[in-house]
Amino acid sequence: MLNFAWAVLAGFALGTPAVPLGLSVSLAPPVALVAVLLGAAGCLLSAVFAAGWLRARWLAWRSKRRPVTAGSRPEKRRHRLDGPTGRRARRVVNRYGVIGFGIIGPALFGTWGSAMLGTALGLPRWRLIGWLMAGVTLWCTVMLLASEAVIDAFGLR
């Protein structure tokens, strides 16, 4: 039971890379997969809701601080998502939509990163969570199969 809890905690903290850790604490492969997926689900939910709350507060603060007047010219400002990671995330969202971002995001940005970036980009919350969970499930399954192949190839069991 303690090993399962460690795998859930590792899934929360690390996301997909926690699958080999679940296998290393002597959990059966399906049990390790379920434990990591439970942890990753907690990670996604907490990250999306926390980032959504922060985004709403930031937008409210920004609208109070810098009111838009009718004749004013918008300034060319550098935003936080203008860096290389933000540009890559925008490119994925523009090209593939929420579905593609949810499937590709965990591999490119990690579990925490894709949840935060998706929320910062303003993607719909529940669609983002659903597709990110589908992506995490896909990548955890791939990681499980690869880990099992390595364990069998080197005779580590």
Image: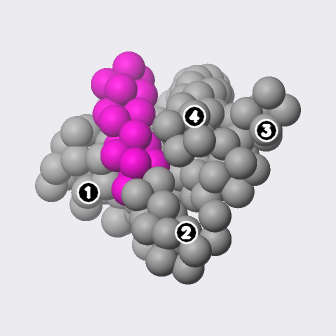
In the foreground, 137 or 64? 137
Who comes first in sequence, dot 2 or dot 3?
A: 3
Image height check: is 91 above or below 133? below
Q: Which residue range is magenta in the image?
A: 125-143
Which mark lies nearer to you, 2 or 3? 2
Residue at left 49%, top 69%? 152
Circle 2 residue: 151
Report the Cα–Cα distance between label 2 and label 1: 34 Å
Which mark lies nearer to you, 3 or 1? 3
Who comes first in sequence, dot 4 or dot 2?
A: 4
Quadrant position of residue 118: top left
Report the Cα–Cα distance between label 4 and label 1: 32 Å
- Check if residue 25 falls in the magenta segment: no
Who comes first in sequence, dot 2 or dot 1?
A: 1
Circle 4 residue: 31
Residue at left 34%, top 46%? 138
Callout 2: SS? helix
Circle 3 residue: 3
What amino acid is labelled 1 in the image? Val
